[in-house]
Image (cartoon, rainbow, N blue to C red):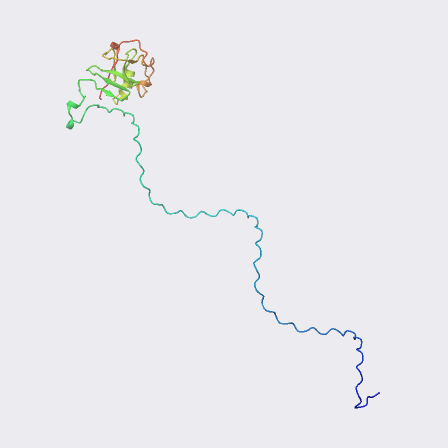
Amino acid sequence: KLVKEGAPRGPQGRRGEPGQAGLPGAPGAPGRNGMLGAVGAPGAQGVRGERGPTGAVGPAGPAGEDGPRGPQGPAGPPGEKGELGRQGAEPGAYLHSIRQPALSSFNPNLCPDGDNGIIRLAQCNHRACRLEVLHENHWGSVCDDGFDNTNARVVCSSLGYPAHRAEAVRAIGGGSGRIWLDDVKCKGSEEQLTMCGHAGWGRADCGHWEDVGVCCKRV
């Protein structure tokens, strides 16, 4: 019935049952981006990776500049004394302009002497000089047994004299001390008398009256 206008309002009725859900509405417009958040704390350090393979060798760099020269080192000890050189063709002879007879052993009337540190010619006269040889730091004579001009040529050549005019003189004598060599036999090609064949050092069956002499010629 229609409520009469001006009539008093009645009590409120009971709430009705919920209605069925409506259909989904259309998607709304995208919202605006939010504000940038604060920087987070650093993360923990990761596990160390394995070592990689060795790389190829690079090209050599350019040479550096030379460094300054270092200070000079101390002088070394003196070297050993060298061997005595071969004697010249005119031992003891001086040029005519500077010749001093008192200091010279040169005498045209005597066979020339000589000393190469291994053999020497001593006590020379007009015939020959006594041949001596050095062994065990002592000079000794040579016996004339079998000593010929071939041996004499080796002697004179080693003293710097021409070999072709060398002469052996037997029994010149006059020596003292040891007789070092006997039965010397040279081939003629030896550089020193000590390279020739002989009976052995100190093995001699002769006396000093048999000391051999050698005369070398200057020309």
Quadrant location, the C terminus: top left
Query: Left or right: where does residue 16 sit relative to residue 30?
Result: right
Give x and y (percent) for residue 145: 29, 10
Residue 1 rendering spot, x and y as whole percentages: 84, 87
Res 81 → quadrant: top left
Q: Is residue 21 left or right of residue 77?
A: right
Position of residue 108 measured from the top left corner of the image (x, y, whole percent):
17, 19
Residue 164 shows in this picture:
no
Apparent side of residue 205 relative to residue 101 in the rendered image (left or right): right
Q: Residue at x 24, y 20 (%)?
A: 114
Residue 30 percent coordinates (x, y): 65, 72
Outermost residue, right side: 1
Q: Quadrant of residue 186?
A: top left
In the rendered view, would you say 142 is above or below 30? above
| Residue at 30%, 20% in the rendered image | 192
How many labels were placed on the picture?
0
The answer to whether 191 appears left or right of 35 in the picture is left
Out of 102 and 55, give the one closest to the viewer.
55
Query: Of 74 and 151, which appears nearest the observer?
Result: 74
